[in-house]
Image (spheres, grey):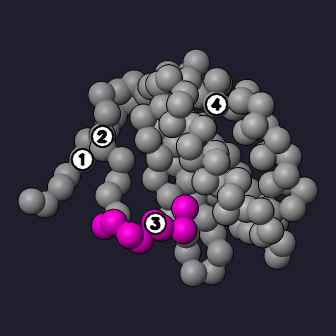
Amino acid sequence: MNDQHAIPPTPVEAFEPPYYMAVFTAVRAQDQSGYDETAARMEDLVKDVPGFLGMDLAQTPGGLGITVGYFRDADALTEWRCNAEHRVAQKRGQAQWYQSYTLHVAKVERSHGFARV
C-alpha cells in the first residue's frame, strides 16, 4: 500500500448496477506496528473473493482514511466479511490500529463515470 503514488490514481470504473459497496472510514491510533503488512495482505486476499470488483483508497493529511470496496453481490461481500484472516485483522484494528471507524454498506443503484483522454 505504500506504493500508491507509483502510478497515477484512477478511480474504480463504473459497473452495471446493482452491486454493493462497503465504505470503511477510519482515524488511526498511535501504534501502527504491523499495519502496512496486514493492509497489503488484506488487499491481496480480497482480490481472491469471487465477485470483488475493486477498491478505492484515500488518506487525508490529518489521518482520516477511506477505503471503498466494490462487490458484485451480497454473497461476495459476506464472503469477505467472514474471511478468517480478515476477521483477525479486524480485531487487531480495534485493539491497536484504529482510534475510531465507521463502516457503511450500500447497494448501488446508479453508476456512471468519466475519463478525459
**Res 4 label:** 3
Who comes first in sequence, dot 4 or dot 1? 4
Q: Residue at 78% x, 46% y: name it.
A: 89
Q: CA distance from mark 4 to mark 2?
A: 21 Å
Q: Is residue 7 magenta?
A: yes
Q: Secondary structure at mark 4?
A: helix
Three-letter code for the amino acid on which mark 3 is drawn: Gln
Our reading of the magenta stretch's main secondary structure is loop
Q: Position of residue 28 (x, y in %)?
A: 74, 68
Asked if the residues shown at circle 3 and circle 4 are in contact, with their CB atoms under 8 angstroms apart, the answer is no
Three-letter code for the amino acid on which mark 4 is drawn: Trp
Who comes first in sequence, dot 3 or dot 2? 3
Observer-nearest of 41 and 46? 41
Answer few, some or many: residues within 10 Å of disc 2's Cα (few below 14, many 20 plus, some between 14 and 19): few
Q: Is residue 47 visible?
A: yes
**Which callout, 4 or 1, points to the residue nearer the camera?**
4
**Which callout, 3 or 4, points to the residue nearer the camera?**
3
Q: Secondary structure at mark 1?
A: loop
Three-letter code for the amino acid on which mark 2 is drawn: Ala
Pick the quarter of the image with the N terminus. bottom right
Q: Residue at label 1?
A: 113
Q: Position of residue 69 (x, y in %)?
A: 52, 42
Q: Residue at label 4?
A: 80
**Residue most toward the right?**
95
**Magenta segment boundaries in residue numbering:** 1-8
**Which callout, 4 or 2, points to the residue nearer the camera?**
4
Three-letter code for the amino acid on which mark 1 is drawn: Gly
Residue 105 placement: quadrant: top right
Asked if the residues shown at circle 2 and circle 1 are in contact, with their CB atoms under 8 angstroms apart, the answer is yes
Q: Is residue 107 visible?
A: no
